Amino acid sequence: MTTLLAAGCLAASLPAGAEPDVATCIQPGPVLRYLVVFSQFTTAEAANSEITEACGTTTVYYPEIGVAVATSPDPGFLKHIGPQRAYSAQAESIAKRSAKRKKDDTELLRPAGVRSGEQWDMDLIKAPAAHEITTGSKSVVVGVLDSGVDARHPDLVSALAPELSAGCLTGKPDTSPSAWIPTTSAHGTHVAGTIAAADDGRGTTGVAPGVRIASVKVVDDDGFIYPEYAVCGFMWAAAQGMTITNNSYFIDPYLFTCQSEPGQRVVYEAVRRAVDYATSRNVLTVAAAGNNAADLSRPGRDSLSPTNGDAQTRPVDSTCVVLPAQLKNVVGVSAVESTKTKAGYSSYGLGAIDVTAPGGDRRTPTGCVLSTVPSGYDYSCGTSMAAPHAAGVAALIASTHPETDAVSLGRMLNAQAETLACPADYDLNGTGVQDAFCTGYSEYNSFYGHGLVDALAAVTK
């Protein structure tokens, strides 16, 4: 744990406003990045002073939410600030001594050819019919918080807004193109195409091809989405006046972030504040439920965390949530395959899922979801693919109701959904054993929330 790194610290806390004594700040390295939570309304000057006194350097401070990102080579930094107020995913990785590249839990399958007729997912949510009425408004911007978006892809060139794009891999927005283009992952470009690929008769077509998208890079080259990346992404989206953000990820290094654990409580509080602030600035947050087939309302255990070290099975309770999907005012999205049945991998949970959308399943005849990637086009399965369908439908609603605030937009997205009742039999493998148990009622249940997003209803109701 990060607290191990604080052991043996030689520095002592300094009085407020005092200059740090360099003799008490040790510099053994490595320089680690920390997320630091302050009392809300703490001034930038006060926050910077406290970080400096703790032998750290402020990278960025978000006064709107009282959250900073700082760096320090001093292993005593965490002890000075307090483990109840600071957290470093990097330190956790070092403490676990087995940092590794995170595996992408979506599936990519190379197609033999590409035709818009292969987009069963768009037909399922009636997107082609919706496009006869509207393809969306350029005044609507969807922030793709992901691994970067290919700015040169012919299906995305007209939709991408470079001036609104940024990289967040230091916790501070960087608007240089090199900071927000994809480097090691096609994931963000695939998500972007599902939302807004051009309706030009070539390649693929997105749910809302008339809206704009912004690339907000929150996935590093090892595949991790650390909390400071996500906080930066939410704050950037709010500052730029985006309408919606799509979040096809969970925040590392814990699949379930437990509020009872000191470091994880810091992560929860910082991300919650950032999402709440974005909501207050009328940014709707849409997030994937995850691909672990977990009942998020009763998770029981987590055997995948930490994702940046040796995973250990641990019990988790109702205070442990998937971030950002289970936060208030976030639209949590599960995945269905072409028969409108919950995909076997999709997580679920009564109260955790708001709507469902196509995510595909390679075991079915129609397979995965086709969309853009930097090299052209690919199929991919996952709730990562379901979320951008929901974000695209929300973008269509926002286009036809431009004065709608974020909370109302989320409610309208729920209201337009096609009701899906719990399946009578959910034995996917024919073994005679139910693979999961759906609870709730037709209009609202643990598999599908309020139902399947419906693009046509979004622009007509």
Image (cartoon, rainbow, N blue to C red):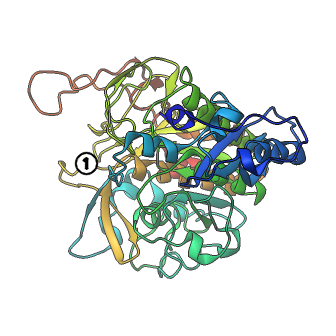
**Front-most of 115 and 146?**
146
Name the secondary structure under disc 1: loop
Residue 20 lies left or right of residue 200; in this view the side is: right
Work out whether 167 lies above or below 457: below
Residue 301 lies left or right of residue 144; in this view the side is: left
Residue at the image position 84 percent from the left and 45 percent from the top: 49
Residue 180 lies left or right of residue 241; in this view the side is: left
The picture places residue 384, in percent across and down from the top left corner, at 42, 50
Observer able to see residue 348: yes
Residue tagged 1: 361
Q: Amino acid at mark 1?
A: Asp
Residue at the image position 35 percent from the left and 23 percent from the top: 314
How crowded pointer 1 is (Cα within 10 Å; few <14, some 14-19, many 20+) is rated as many
**Front-most of 360 and 36?**
36
Work out whether 315 lies above or below 47: above
Work out whether 294 lies above or below 217: above
Work out whether 412 lies above or below 224: above
Observer able to see residue 411: no
Say which quadrant the C terminus sits in: top right
The picture places residue 71, in percent across and down from the top left corner, at 65, 52
Residue at the image position 52 percent from the left and 75 percent from the top: 156
**Front-most of 372 and 45?**
45
Residue 398 lies left or right of residue 414; in this view the side is: right
